[in-house]
Image: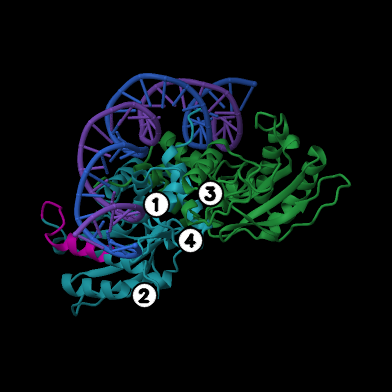
Chain colours: A cyan, B green, C purple, D blue
Amino acid sequence: MSGPIQSIERAAAVLHFLGAVPEPVALGDLARALGLPKPTTHGIVRTLLGVGFVVQDPESGHYAIGGGLTRLGETLDPHLLRSRAANWADGLAARTGLEVQLGILSGSAVELLHHVFRPDDSPQRLRVGELQPLHATALGLALLAFSPAAVRPRDLVMTAYTPATVTRALDLTRAVQQTARRGWSLADGTYRPGVAALAAPIRHHVGVGVGALAVVGLRERVLTPAGEPLPGLLEQLVAAGSAISDRLEERL
Amino acid sequence: MSGPIQSIERAAAVLHFLGAVPEPVALGDLARALGLPKPTTHGIVRTLLGVGFVVQDPESGHYAIGGGLTRLGETLDPHLLRSRAANWADGLAARTGLEVQLGILSGSAVELLHHVFRPDDSPQRLRVGELQPLHATALGLALLAFSPAAVRPRDLVMTAYTPATVTRALDLTRAVQQTARRGWSLADGTYRPGVAALAAPIRHHVGVGVGALAVVGLRERVLTPAGEPLPGLLEQLVAAGSAISDRLEERL
DNA sequence: ACGGACGTTCGGCAATGCCGAACGTCTGCT
DNA sequence: AGCAGACGTTCGGCATTGCCGAACGTCCGT
């Protein structure tokens, strides 16, 4: 049997130590206490800083347990998500001229939490609360790729909404993998004919997806004739997703 | 600048994922969600299991966040420590015929929480609540070596209680390092002439020292003429320290 | 002005972590 | 009852990664 992973055990020792002491700890004291050289201890602490498990007092330079660790068990309130996302979603609709949707995973479907109309006069229907299929929408692909809940493609009922809808588990798996690699998803006429969408994940607790933000519109308003996202559109979407993610970490 | 440590980041991703999902997670689902091979994920999870940050449901084999993580910020109540230690301490005194002391770090001194008299008729004084010096006692050396609170030898006032008392910071540092290597400490006439003591740490949260247990008596009752622990005595002491440590993890 | 201690960076080295192949076990299906 | 698939787990070869000594710039106390 292979042994335990040394650097994870050392990181745990750091966290145990910091958790046992009420005051923030100097790096040198931590290193001495654990019997490790300062650069070794520093490398561990820097990584724990990066994942939010440790924080550093900016004045003293000392280290303490961070909120990212103590908040591990917390799940995100959908109302909080919506409240944090609303302004960004409204701004994105205004800038792109497209419909913007915010969704979360609900069982084996996408639930729309927020829906911003295209900023024009055309008739539109408010869809908040609506369930959408995971396999046929950009929001669905993003949630499958980044959400912690383990929904497997083979466990889904894959209705064909258009001739372009993916209905085989293997094809869906590939689409999800592609989404994971790119950091965003694309749906081209898979849910409504002639309608395309792009979606980006919204994350909480370093890297964990809790929702997705999408821009939706007629294909030629979202994609090039070759089927790629229009220039600038993807960047605005991903930036909005990141900004919302950052706001989720803020405490009010 | 060197980058973050990959295996610590991966471990954090595991914890984030487990923390985001209400139900225990299958190893295969965890591996898929994180995009890692199963053996890689298993190595990480096995290590997190070992440090108490993750637990495994024995029936389903699934993994969840463990109490060792959520209890990181908890400090140990001295009354709990005393209550858990008392029976072991009493038994140790009965088996060894020596005085047994339980101490914790209190500022820059040892505070005795529990004191068991030698099981004989000689006059003895109850010392619970007494403060003892860190530099001159076996309890003190054990607490310096294993306790999370960072007390540095150079910050101590080192009174000479006997000619054998260590009074130089460098000598104390070496004694503490030796204690850390051995896992136990030895004081030979450094606090009271002709009296020797051995001490072992009591740990909480994998490896963090929260107290120490000592056997104390006339030198010839504790050490060989060469100054080594009497055969069998050290093993009984270390075993008692371990048993008390184990009992601290139990929930009532 | 100087020395000591701090947190931090750098890069050479080899120890360690990674992960494909394989295993034994369990469960569900035929 | 037998078989196939999926599970968690183990093993060991390989090279990537983590480790840590040397060194740095900064800050503080003397």
**In front: mark 2 or mark 1?**
1
Disc 2 chain ID: A
**Span highlighted in magenta in the image:** A225-242
The quadrant in which the C terminus of chain B is found is bottom right
Residue on which disc 3 sits: B167
Residue in the picture at 82% in, 52% down = B124
State which quadrant residue B138 falls in.
top right
State which quadrant residue B220 falls in.
top right
State which quadrant residue A194 falls in.
bottom left
Q: Amino acid at mark 4?
A: Thr
Disc 1 chain ID: A
Residue on which disc 4 sits: A70
Which of the two discs, 4 and 1, labels the residue nearer the N terminus? 1
Which of the two discs, 2 and 1, labels the residue nearer the N terminus? 1
**In front: mark 1 or mark 3?**
3
Q: Amino acid at mark 2?
A: Ser
Q: CA distance from mark 2 to mark 4?
A: 23 Å
Q: CA distance from mark 2 to mark 1?
A: 43 Å
Residue A204 location (% of width, % of height): 38, 61
Disc 4 chain ID: A
**Element type at marker 3?**
loop
**In the foreground, B105 or A72:** B105
Residue on which disc 2 sits: A83
